[in-house]
Image (spheres, grey):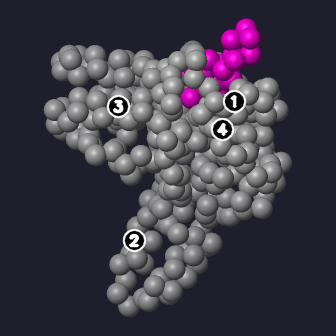
């Protein structure tokens, strides 16, 4: 979750959830990410951790080399911070999660680190994965001693690889029999890639919640929230009043503005998807002409930062 300066929480674009009758479907879809729903950049899967729990140190296993001082695109860390934190979708937010350390300064398995990772990953589309990796590395080395910082970076690499892992078992929302098989595969892969202790810290709660729903097919879906709009449940005016009661007037107004911006963005994205799909199917265009036409459409309808996000979302070269 993103924490806004107004004190409200806003679900990131990685997993915009549904409310009401669609809540359980959103829960399953988010927890059991289907193959191919990860970021488009490719990250090689690292070898599974050689140890588990408190006694495991990525330094003993061989920490990865430090990232370059500058992102691969040439933008400095300061430029990436400006794009994301001052001008982009993370403006006005505080980093979620944290660097979980014990009293001796050693990194401890905790979901707080996954939330911190997801905070950076919510910038995909506005910054590349190499840029986000360099930004995270810079902040980790600024905030932590060398050993826990190195361990954070190794876990980040494994977490990225996990996000892009091609699972063999996909989830069919209309077939509950696919859910336990998909969950079991994801549990196994998570433990192999992150180690038992970190996989449990990152995923145990949501895995247990999903297992509960699998075991109780008739269980009621989670109660709806006033955080995200659900036009089928309440009208905009009622939702705004509920948000004022729950979050305060300033946060409710910001959420209303974000709803409008999000709806406008979705309309533009749907239009782009339709037009780019038409260009990709146009038999009269060569590959070069097709790429030039797509680039021209994007340049005419999106600014530079938006074009990067559209290309990431639509997996365009």
> Residue tagged by mark 3?
188
Magenta part of the chain: 96-117
In percent of the image, x 39 and y 71: which residue is there?
277
Q: Is residue 97 magenta?
A: yes
Q: Establish if 104 lies above or below 97.
A: above
Of callouts 3 and 4, the N-terminal one: 4
Residue 313 location in percent, x, y?
Answer: 50, 56
Of callouts 2 and 4, the N-terminal one: 4
Of callouts 1 and 2, the N-terminal one: 1
Measure the C-alpha gap from mark 3 to mark 4.
23 Å
> Residue tagged by mark 2?
277
Q: Which one is closest to the eye, mark 1 or mark 2? A: 1
> Residue tagged by mark 4?
63
Q: Secondary structure at mark 3?
A: helix
Asked if disc 1 and disc 2 are in contact, CB closer than 8 Å, the reply is no
Measure the C-alpha gap from mark 4 to mark 1.
25 Å
Residue 285, by quadrant, is: bottom left
Residue 17 location in percent, x, y?
Answer: 43, 34
Measure the C-alpha gap from mark 1 to mark 2.
36 Å
> Residue tagged by mark 1?
95
Measure the C-alpha gap from mark 3 to mark 2.
37 Å
Of callouts 4 and 1, the N-terminal one: 4
Residue 311, by quadrant, is: bottom right
Q: Is residue 240 magenta?
A: no
In the picture, measured across the screen, residue 284 lies left or right of residue 220, that is right
């Amino acid at each position: 979750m993103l924490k806004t300066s107004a004190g409200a929480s806003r679900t990131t674009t990685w997993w915009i959830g549904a409310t009401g009758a669609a809540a359980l479907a959103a829960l399953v879809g988010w927890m059991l990410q289907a193959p191919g729903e990860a970021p488009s950049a490719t990250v090689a899967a690292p070898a599974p951790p050689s140890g588990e729990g408190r006694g495991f140190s990525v330094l003993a296993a061989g920490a990865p080399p430090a990232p370059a001082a500058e992102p691969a695109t040439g933008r400095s860390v300061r430029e990436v911070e400006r794009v994301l934190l001052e001008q982009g979708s993370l403006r006005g937010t505080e980093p979620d999660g944290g660097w979980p350390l014990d009293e001796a300064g050693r990194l401890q398995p905790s979901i707080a680190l996954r939330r911190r990772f997801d905070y950076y990953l919510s910038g995909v589309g506005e910054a590349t994965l190499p840029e986000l990796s360099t930004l995270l590395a810079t902040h980790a080395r600024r905030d932590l001693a060398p050993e826990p910082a190195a361990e954070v970076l190794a876990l980040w690499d494994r977490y990225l690889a996990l996000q892009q892992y091609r699972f063999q078992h996909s989830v069919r929302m209309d077939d509950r029999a696919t859910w336990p098989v998909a969950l079991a595969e994801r549990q196994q892969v998570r433990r192999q890639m992150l180690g038992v202790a970190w996989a449990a810290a990152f995923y145990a709660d949501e895995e247990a919640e999903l297992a509960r729903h699998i075991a109780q097919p008739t269980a009621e879906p989670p109660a709806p929230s006033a955080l995200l709009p659900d036009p089928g449940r309440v009208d905009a005016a009622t939702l705004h009043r509920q948000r004022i009661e729950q979050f305060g007037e300033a946060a409710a107004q910001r959420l209303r503005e974000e709803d409008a911006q999000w709806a406008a963005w979705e309309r533009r994205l749907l239009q782009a998807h339709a037009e780019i799909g038409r260009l990709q199917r146009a038999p009269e265009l060569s590959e070069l002409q097709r790429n030039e036409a797509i680039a021209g459409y994007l340049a005419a309808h999106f600014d530079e930062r938006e074009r990067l996000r559209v290309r990431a979302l639509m997996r365009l070269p």
